[in-house]
Image: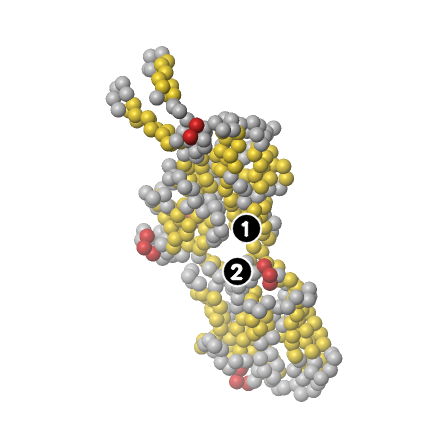
Amino acid sequence: MNREKAVSVELSCSAGPVQVVLEAARPLLLDCSLGSSETPLNITWLRDGAVVSQSQTHWLLANGSLLISGWSEEGHAPAAVVGGYSCLSGGPSGTLSSRTLSLHLASMSRFLHDPEPQVVSAGGTARFECYVDGLPTPIITWEKDQTGLSEPLEPSRYISLPNGVLQILDVSTEDEGLYRCLAFNSARKRFSQEASLTVSPALSQDREVVIVAPPRNLTVVLGRPSVLECLAEGEPKPFVSWSRQDGKPISSDVIVLATNLVIPDTRRHHAGVYVCRANKPKTREFISSQAELRVLAPPVILQSPEPVTLSRGNTARFVCNSSGDPPPSLRWLKNGEPVKSNARVKTQSTGVLLINQLRLDDAGYYQCIAANSLGTACATASLSVIVREGLPSPPRHLSASPRSSTSALLTWDPPEYNSDQIIGFSVHYQRASGQTAMGTI
């Protein structure tokens, strides 16, 4: 497996990508980076909650990273690599868990909607539409008589929208022909069925304003493009304008393409109800249509829990708030494992964890995990429990190594808290015969 061509993604407990697409020639390298100041003793990788083992598609590297190849030498992509990946990083003070990254294989469906034949009066508007699903999101271009319509589209009466719609304004007989769309991504490319455009004689009489392609209610994931169409016809040609129902100005990053609104990078502030209005020139006659844009967003931690140091018997309180659409659910982990509620440990309300009558074994890393259908986010806080206020905490990084049949080397680092109060350490040990001896250092 070629690591040089790998796409590298870092899994942490902070913001980052919530999904990644595995492509044929590009392995995926996952790095576990959970931000602890301690050197991890071990790193464990999970796929859908189960431990990942070494295999032909999963390579556990010496530095703790995970290299994934979803494609065999025969070019087949086993479904065994698809799922939600996370890592656990264990250290002397406890275990940390990363956010979950959803892994998908590059793919493309057959066309779910093919363009349909059009008969349009000269001077009118033709509209072709095609739709295909895939990962990464397919790019759609158009052909006339199997010749590509190059960008920028000429004549400028041709409007190609990111949602797979081709509009031809003020059509004439030179626009007649067979139209089809080409969809492609890293998985494959597909051609739609061809659809004919026939141009009939112009309609000269005065005609009422009609919105032939009104805007549709739209649900878009944060960061994806949005398209709100508004195609109006009438004689004389109507004037089309846009507004927001709530009276706010339309954001300056929204592009007006002919009579359509295009948002290349949809954000939360774009959400709302948009109103398209088509006016008949030199009259007060108009017709309007509206549509709601909803923006889905993966979870974001708004308030992270704070690290605390408390003496035994006190109460620890962790607070975690998040946002997202759909609204995320919250759960708590201690050292990478779900927190179990009991008489001492309970969630007081959404995002609040209480630990009463603290014990020494309550110490460790606590994480809040916010999850919705688009992904997860997490935040971490440490809890240190000391015997009594002012007394030193336990020594850190204690290790013992044998030196001979009768001696051993003990090493440790000073306690994290109140180490200046220490005047000596006592070492307790037990001989193999079962007799107990005590020495003081």
Question: Residue most toward the right?
Answer: 284
Q: Residue at x 52, y 50 (%)?
A: 375
Q: Is residue 175 left or right of residue 424?
A: right
Q: Is residue 27 visible?
A: yes
Q: Name the mark nearer the viewer: 1 or 2.
A: 1
Task: Answer with the quarter of the image where residue 353 lies.
Answer: top right
What label sits on residue 300 in the rendered view? 1
Image coordinates of residue 420 in percent, x first then y, are: 42, 30
Q: Is residue 47 visible?
A: no
Of residues 387 and 333, the one nearer the viewer is: 387
What residue sits right under mark 2 in the picture? 223
Label 2 residue SS: loop
User: Is 102 or 407 nearer to us in this picture?
Assistant: 407
Residue 296 in the image: x percent, y percent?
A: 58, 56
Residue drawn at x 35%, y 17% is 439
Q: Is residue 44 left or right of residue 322?
A: left
Q: Amino acid at mark 2?
A: Gly
- Residue under the point 46% across and 40% down: 96
* Residue 87 position in % (x across, y down): 43, 43
Q: How is the image coloured?
A: secondary structure
- Whether residue 182 is situated above or below residue 175 in the rendered picture: above
Of the 4 image quadrants, the one containing the C terminus is top left
| Residue positioned 49% across, 33% down in the render | 384
Instruction: Please state the horizontal and vertical placement of residue 334, each as a whole percent of the image.
Output: 50, 36
